Image (spheres, helix red, strand yellow):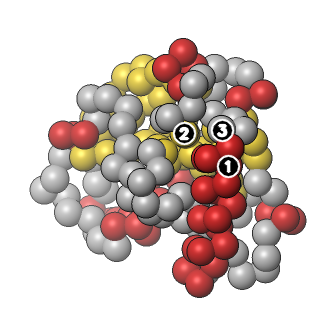
Amino acid sequence: MEVFRISKADYADKLSSSAIANRWNKNGQNVIYTGSSRSLSTLELIVHKGSVAPQIEYKVMVISIADNDSLIKQIMISDLPEEWRKMSAYPMLQKIGSEWYESQESLILKVPSAIIPNEYNFVINTEHPDFSKNVKLIRKEKYFWDDRLL
């Protein structure tokens, strides 16, 4: 399976994590957020950055994950509270993600996108023992910001 991450060019050469807290992880937890498509990854980046700086060079990281269902745990929307998309739900979602991370239950956490219904993001645990043999950076692609997004 291929997943996508849009990153500043300076950080696109290797699969690494900032370990900064986000929707599905707490500070200090090394995870990589990826999207199921380039377009979803674009929207996720815009939403999380709050604005776009077109003068900064970005790359699309194309990441391959081994096709093995046992590597993935999926979070179902039906298992989340109605308000899960709101910022106020972050502590509860971070708890879910943190428990997954610490348990090493799976390499990948498949989570619903808070932006686009019925699309998914994939959170990769870089500290999982299966990481190095099942997750590979396949290539980097040039990325440009369409002026209509700015």
**Are the residues at dot 2 and dot 3 in contact (C-beta closer than 8 Å)?**
yes
Identify which residue, 102 or 66, lies in the foreground: 102
Above-or-below relation of 134 to 92: above
Disc 3, SS: loop
Quarter placement of the C terminus: bottom left
In this picture, is 103 found above or below 134?
below
Q: Secondary structure at mark 2?
A: strand
**In this view of the protein, can residue 130 be seen by the observer?**
yes
Q: Position of residue 139 (x, y in %)?
A: 37, 22
| Residue at 69% across, 36% down | 106
Q: Position of residue 120 (x, y in %)?
A: 66, 51
Vertical position of residue 120 compared to residue 79: above or below? above
Which disc is residue 125 wearing? 2
Mark sitting on residue 100: 1
Determine which of the numbered discs, if any, sits on residue 104 in the image. Answer: 3
Q: Looking at the rendering, in which quadrant would you find the N terminus? A: top right
